[in-house]
Image: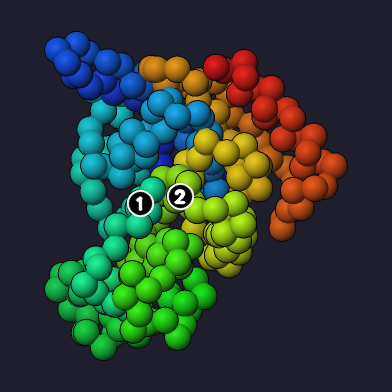
Amino acid sequence: MDRTVVHIECDGVGKSYLQKGRTVPVLEGLSFGVRERELLVVLGPGQSGKTTLLRLMAGLEAPDAGCVRMHGEPVTGPGTDRGLVFQSYMLFPWLTVLGNVEIGLDIQGRRTGATRAQARDKARAYLDMVGLSGFEDYFPHQLSGGMKQRVGIARAYALEPQVMLLDEPFGQLDAQTRLSMEQETERIWRANRKTMVFVTNNIDEAVYLADRIAILEGKLPGRLAAIRDVPLPRPRDPMDVAFLRLREEITAMQKLAL
C-alpha cells in the first residue's frame, strides 16, 4: 500500500473536561494524519493530553471540537478497526493467557461465524508472534510485567485491526524489560507493517521506534509543537552517533515546547 495514504487523522481536534466546576482544556487545535503502515509516535511529558488523544482515536471519547477520521469517515465510537493497548495490563485474572487472548475473538466470532476452534488457533498464533508459546495455560499472576504486556499486545493484534493504538504500554516496566519490549514491538511492526500510533513520554523510546514523531507541547491544553521525521535505518542502535544526534535534536525541540 501507498505509505502516503492517510489512515487515521485528526482535524482541528479539541477536548475539555469539567473539573471542580471549571472547564479545563486538555487538547486544542490538533491536526495531523497517520500514514498507511506508519509507526507514528506521539511524544510529550505528563499532563500534555497524550492519553486523551489516543482515547479520541479509539472512539472511547468524542472531541468537543474538530474531528477524528478513519479513511475519511468520522470516528463515532470504538470499533474492531482499531486495537488498543493500555498503560495498565487490563488482563482478566481468572482467565489463562490463552483465555485472555481468546475472549475478544469469541465475541468477534459471534458476529462473523468463526468457530471456537478457529479462535483458539488464531490466539495461539498471536501468542507465538509475541514469544509466549508454552505459556498458554499460565494465569496473569504467574507472569512478569513484560509478559503481561505481551498478552495485551497479542490480544489486540488477534482481532486484526487496521490501526494499533498503544498508550505508554511500557511505562510500568523496569529499564531492561522496557528495552526488550521496545525491541519486540519494533520487530513485530516490521513483520506486518500494521499502522501504529504509539504514545510515550520517553525520547529514546520515540527515536528508537518511530517513522515520525509528533511532539506535543508540555502544558495544557496540548497542542502540536512539531512533527519530526526519523530517517534512521532499522533496527536502530541507541549508541549510534546518528541516533544520539537525533535524540539531542528531539530533546531540544521538546524543551522549546515546554
Reply above or below: 121 against 191. Answer: below
Indicate the quadrant where residue 149 lies.
Answer: bottom left
Task: Tell me the residue at 73%/42% (across/down).
Answer: 231
Indicate the quadrant where residue 223 lies.
Answer: top left
At label 2, counting other C-alpha atoms closer than 10 Å, the crowd grade (few under 14, some 14-19, many 20 or more) is: some
Question: Mark 2 is on which residue type?
Answer: Gln
* Residue 172 - label: 2
Dividing the image into 4 quarters, which one contains the N terminus? bottom right
Q: Considering depth in this image, is 230 or 216 the residue closer to the camera?
A: 216
Whether residue 73 is visible: no
**Left or right: 183 as drawn, with respect to 138:** right
* Residue 88 - label: 1
Reply above or below: 120 against 225. Answer: below
Question: Mark 1 is on which residue type?
Answer: Ser
Q: Considering depth in this image, is 9 or 142 the residue closer to the camera?
A: 142
Residue 124 at what x, y percent from top left?
Answer: 39, 82
Give the secondary structure at mark 1: loop
Label 2–label 1 contact, CB within 8 A = yes
Q: CA distance from mark 2 to mark 1?
A: 8 Å
Residue 72 at what x, y percent from top left?
Answer: 35, 39
Reply above or below: 182 against 118. Answer: above
Q: Considering depth in this image, is 253 or 46 the residue closer to the camera?
A: 46
Dividing the image into 4 quarters, which one contains the C terminus? top right
Task: Tell me the residue at 48%/62% (across/down).
Answer: 146
Task: Tell me the residue at 31%/39% (across/down).
Answer: 55
